[in-house]
Image: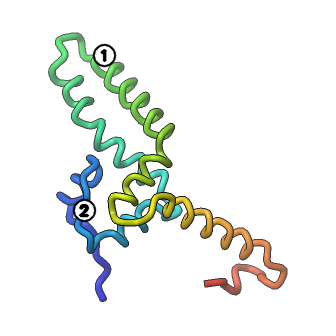
Amino acid sequence: MRRQRPTPAQWVWYALGGGLPRELAPWVLADTTRSTWVWRHLARAAVQLLPLVVVCLLLVPVPLVYRLSAAGGGLLLGLLFSLAYMVETIEHRVAKAGYEPGTATRVRTERAERDRVERLAPYRRDGAGSFD
């Protein structure tokens, strides 16, 4: 069975807050629970902020240095606010994909615990062994 991923257009729609087809629900859960989930969230937030940054850079009638500082500051603040509500946003995405609320947090917590147990296992040496 081939692993399904969204098309680039579907991913942009997903990044902007839209839903994906039901057959991509496992991908949504994987996207929100991988070890890189924070960076993936920031990438989606940057896509959401991109139109505002472009408008600020191209349409505001002030010198370029002011537009650059406003766009950079706006992007930084937007990403900070996005980080502040990251867990809630992720859980909403997972619920929209058809999973129970709290699923992403539970999966990440279970994975972290499994990694911790595996890392501290007394018989495990140099990466040998696995609990999967």
In the rendered image, the vertical position of residue 74 relative to residue 131, given as above or below: above
Residue under pointer 1: 65
Tell me where residue 62 appears, x and y as whole percent.
22, 10
State whether residue 102 is above or below residue 132.
above
Describe the element under mark 1 as helix, strand or loop: helix
Q: How is the image coloured?
A: rainbow
Q: Quadrant of residue 113?
A: bottom right
Q: Would residue 106 be found to the left or right of residue 82 on screen? A: right
Instruction: Pick whichever, 57 or 116, lies toward us.
Output: 116
Q: CA distance from mark 1 to mark 2?
A: 39 Å
Task: Check disc 1 and give the amino acid type.
Answer: Val
The residue lying at 47 percent from left, 45 percent from top is: 86
Classify 10 Å Cα crowding around label 1: few (below 14), some (14-19), many (20 and above).
few
Q: Quadrant of the N terminus?
A: bottom left
For image coordinates 42% across by 47% down, the residue present is 89
Q: Residue furthest bottom?
A: 1
> How many numbered discs, if any?
2
User: Mark 2 is on which residue type?
Assistant: Leu
Seen as rendered, the residue at the extreme front is 100
Residue nearest the observer in this picture, 26 or 72:
26
Q: Above or below — where is 98 with respect to 39?
A: below
Counting from the top left corner in percent of width and height, residue 73 is at: 39, 24
Residue at 28%, 48% (x, y): give it. 17
Residue 63 picture quarter: top left
Kindly identify which residue carries mark 2. Answer: 20
The disc label shown at residue 127, or none = none
Residue appearing at x 32%, y 25% in the figure: 71
Q: Position of residue 40 (x, y in %)?
A: 41, 54
Percent coordinates x, y for residue 100 in the rendering:
44, 63
